[in-house]
Image (cartoon, helix red, strand yellow):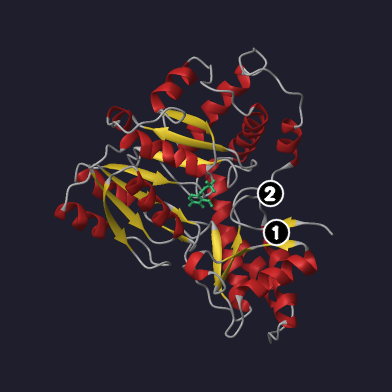
Amino acid sequence: MKQYLFTPGPTPVPPEVLAAMGAPIVHHRSPDFRPIYERCLTRLREVCRTESDVLLFTASGTGAFESAVANLVTPGEPHLVVSAGSFGERWAAMTAAYGADVDELRYAWGETPDADDVRSRLAERESKAVWVVHSETSTGVVADVKAIAEAARDCGALIVVDAVSSLGAVRCETDAWGLDVVVSGSQKALMTPPGLGLAAVSDAAFAARGTSPRFYFDWERTREAQRKLDAPFTPPVSLVAGLDVALGLLMGEGLEAAFDRHVRLGRACRAGVKALGLELFSPDEDRSAVVTAVRAPDGLDSGEVVLSLRDRFGITIANGQGELKGKIFRIGHIGWFDVFDITTALAALELALADLGGDFERGVAVTAALEAFEAAPVT
Ligand code: PLP
């Protein structure tokens, strides 16, 4: 059976990227690798929209995030972590594990963090850094990181952003918005298999390094080595070669065009789901362009929908995480996606739900999705 991957990470990988990864292995300190490494690091700065170094780690996104925690947190220091879902809560636990004195601004899963709340919390208690998730993949909510960064800056705090599922799909202006650290991973909108994590690190964040023990994830070690195009440890050369090609594809499309495409994919997916009479869990707004989260119909476990799509059609979507498991399902649309991926997912969803007792006019979801994709221009 043909397999389709419609999860918000990992995501499908274009054939050009797979082909680059299938090339013979080169040595990482040879002239065969250095131009690839250099181009990849340059392209990462373009995607992050920063002049600062983007540090590349052999790790998933969580590892790159841990680099930020290990380099910035000194035990006992106050930090403010904003959480509104699975990943925000992970960062609260991680900063606490490194001994930070964590103030958690905790929202219910599905709520949207608010910059004024961040401002009030920082007015009550100074923090060295604010840690926030840009796109909370567990809920589909995309936060207004620009406004939150402004609040942090006004209160003298650094801002660290988890852009694991947003970088390359949703606007994230590292320098223009004054983001001190932006973390991401290869397996989402960057259209590459899992295994590479990255952290764009501003001079201010670099200067604010703390005393927690670290070695593999030490920013200074990686930054010094990267500046000489001499990775501190053996990099996954095939993944870097793949990421280089994927970033070339993204730059070829143009970042602005990629952001627009993701807005339209989000609109299409939401329109299709609503046409089936389903209730959205993620917000019905353009910013929510990474993943569409949908409440399971009354009396149905979302796991049944997920299983039915997989068993009958080879389509993988995601169940809810944590407390939302069984209650929502999530259709991802980041990276190498076009509208026909959305209509494929919706057509299959329609069939699966009809089998499970759903009552709707056949074909409505696909029609609504195509109309929404083509409709108004992105503003
Ligand atoms: N943060 C967000 C928003 C994510 O979506 C994910 C992965 O799904 C992570 C962090 C963790 O990344 P990884 O699984 O690559 O460690």
Relative to 361, residue 137 above or below: above
The amino acid beneath tag 2 is: Pro
Q: Secondary structure at mark 1?
A: helix
Q: Position of residue 59 (x, y in %)?
A: 54, 37
Of pointers 2 and 1, the one earlier in the residue sequence: 2
Indicate the position of residue 84 as horizontal and vertical percent values. 39, 61
Q: Residue at x 54, y 52 (%)?
A: 260
Q: Residue at x 54, y 23 (%)?
A: 233
State the image coordinates of residue 362 (x, y, percent, origin top left): 74, 80
Query: Which amino acid lies under the numbered mark 1 shown in the image of this protein?
Result: Asp
Between disc 2 and disc 1, the foreground one is 2
Q: The N terminus appears in which quarter of the rendering? A: bottom right
The residue that label 1 is drawn on is 341
Q: Are marks 2 and 1 in contact (CB under 8 Å)?
A: yes
Q: Secondary structure at mark 2?
A: loop
Question: Can you tell which quarter of the image residue 118 is in?
Answer: bottom left
Q: Is residue 340 left or right of residue 37?
A: right
**Disc 2 marks which residue?**
12
**In front: 234, or 167?**
234
The vertical placement of 202 against 320, above or below, is above
Residue 287 circle label: none
Which residue is at a point 32% across and 48% down the rendered structure image? 96
Question: How far apart are labels 2 and 1 at the CA level?
Answer: 11 Å
Residue 208 versus residue 34 in the image, above or below: below
